[in-house]
Image (cartoon, rainbow, N blue to C red):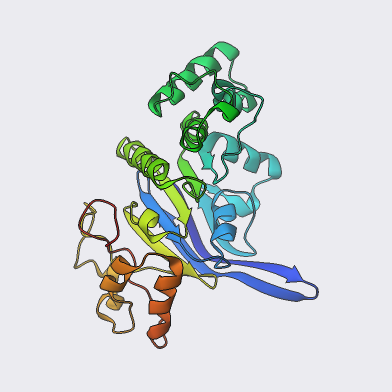
Amino acid sequence: MVFELKNIYKDYLQGKEAVHVLKDISISVDDGEYVAIMGPSGSGKSTLMNIIGCLDKQTKGTFFFDGADIMSCSDKQLSSIRNKKIGFVFQNFNLLPRQSALENVELPLLYAGVPKKQRHELAKQALKKVGLEDRMMFKPTQLSGGQKQRVAIARAIVNKPKLLLADEPTGALDTKSGDQVMELFKELNDDGVTIVMITHEPEIANCAKRVMYIRDGELHKGAFDSRNPNFNENDTDEVSDNANNSNDIEISEIRKAQSVEELMESYRKNKNTPNISFADKGEEGGKTK
């Protein structure tokens, strides 16, 4: 198992009052999984990403990452986990503008104390894996948006982390570049890379093998995609009684949704809807219908 969160709460103080951002979140991710967490702005998905990425600690609950109890870790230990076990991919790339693609990819290895010659070789291998072996010496200003994101992905995987954590990885890209990044994620996952992706776009979430929906700080899980090799329509542990619950949003509505707003409209039409069967997806490889 890569990580497990149990009954996670996160509160922030606003003046003298506590604002409850995350409420009773439980999720576990195994090696080799590809999970999308989807939600609208203000849903708590960025806060959840910060906790999964060991950038912040929960207020209450337990979080184990690769066997380590995160709540009891020191700042130095958390820094080591982030550097060696988590690869981050951000919406706006976060590349150093004066450094070449190769030097940007080398950064996690530099922080990890890897010798220069080995750093060079590993960074070259990572850039080759994302199809940028002919752009190694280019600065970010000389690269397209899609190429910048591929450099960021190479940087994220160069340390061979336990988890690739992506925050809106296509948010700053055009459709074609976004599709290329999603295809690259699929290839990485097929090679065994564990991916958790945060997004607000149904079409992007649809590329993952498991999708969860966060709203008002609460995580909703539904039936799994039948294309997932681990899918079992009789698996009551995952699908539960909600699969036949009239309060669930119809899968057809999810397939038709082109945005979070449209999906939320479907949500509002269902009275007292506590659960969302959101992980079922269209039949044709990664596109909503």
Which quarter of the rendered picture does the C terminus lie within?
bottom left
Rendering coords of residue 58 (x, y %): 62, 60
Q: Quadrant of residue 134?
A: top left
Which residue appears at 63% of the width and 49% of the height?
55
**In this view, 110 is above or below 9:** above
Is 187 placed left or right of 38 in the picture?
left
Is 245 placed left or right of 20 in the picture?
left
**In this view, 39 is above or below 82:** below
Which residue appears at 55% of the width and 11% of the height?
117
**In this view, 173 is above or below 138:** below
Q: Residue furthest top?
A: 117
Rendering coords of residue 195 (x, y %): 41, 46
Q: How many marks?
A: 0
Q: Residue furthest bottom?
A: 271
**In this view, 222 is above or below 201:** below
Is 105 placed left or right of 254 in the picture?
right
Residue 66 at least partly seen: no
Rendering coords of residue 226 (x, y %): 21, 59
Rendering coords of residue 30 (x, y %): 38, 49
Q: Nearer the viewer, residue 179 or 34?
A: 179
Which residue appears at 56% of the width and 48% of the height?
53
